[in-house]
Image (cartoon, rainbow, N blue to C red):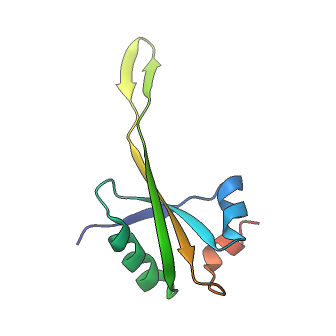
Amino acid sequence: MKRVLKKPVISEKAVALAESGKYVFLGDNLASKPEVAKAVEELFKVKVVKVNSFKIAGKEKTFRRIKGRQQSKHKFVVTLKKGDKIELFEGAK
């Protein structure tokens, strides 16, 4: 089984979304919305209502005349059932 979720995103905007029951995760580039919903439900014992996803293309970077490219990222915004919380995000406030 592939690792669907890589890590939670703890940023100012993500913490503000967490107050309204939406949590942001970085995931596998090939992961689908149902796979992410299932992984969050099993990992945190909550009910997922909706999953939004978007991909961020990797940027080209130059370091001492050597060109390289950052990895692409796939972010998922998971909306939970009203009343459910993920305690991981509560400590970031």
> Residue placed at 45% from the left, 13% from the top?
64
Of the 4 image quadrants, the one containing the C terminus is bottom right
Question: Of 92 and 39, which appears nearest the observer?
Answer: 39
Seen from this angle, which residue lies furthest left? Answer: 1
At 47% from the left edge and 68% from the top edge, which residue is drawn? 51
Q: Residue 57: name its quadrant.
A: top left
The structure residue drawn at horizontal position 33% and vertical position 53%, both measured from the top left corner, is 29
Residue under the image location 41 percent in, 85 percent down? 42
Residue 43 percent across, percent down from the top left: 45, 81
Residue 28 point in image, percent of width and height: 34, 58
Q: Pick out the residue farthest to the right.
A: 93
Q: How many marks?
A: 0
Residue 56, how many percent across, how many down?
Answer: 44, 43
Q: Nearer the viewer, residue 49 or 24?
A: 49
- Name the quadrant of the N terminus: bottom left
Q: Is residue 43 above or below residue 7?
A: below
Residue 3, by quadrant, is: bottom left
Left or right: residue 1 compared with residue 36: left
Q: Quadrant of residue 89?
A: bottom right
Task: Name the foreground residue: 88 vs 73.
Answer: 73
Q: Name the residue at the top extreme.
A: 65
Q: Position of residue 16 (x, y in %)?
A: 72, 62
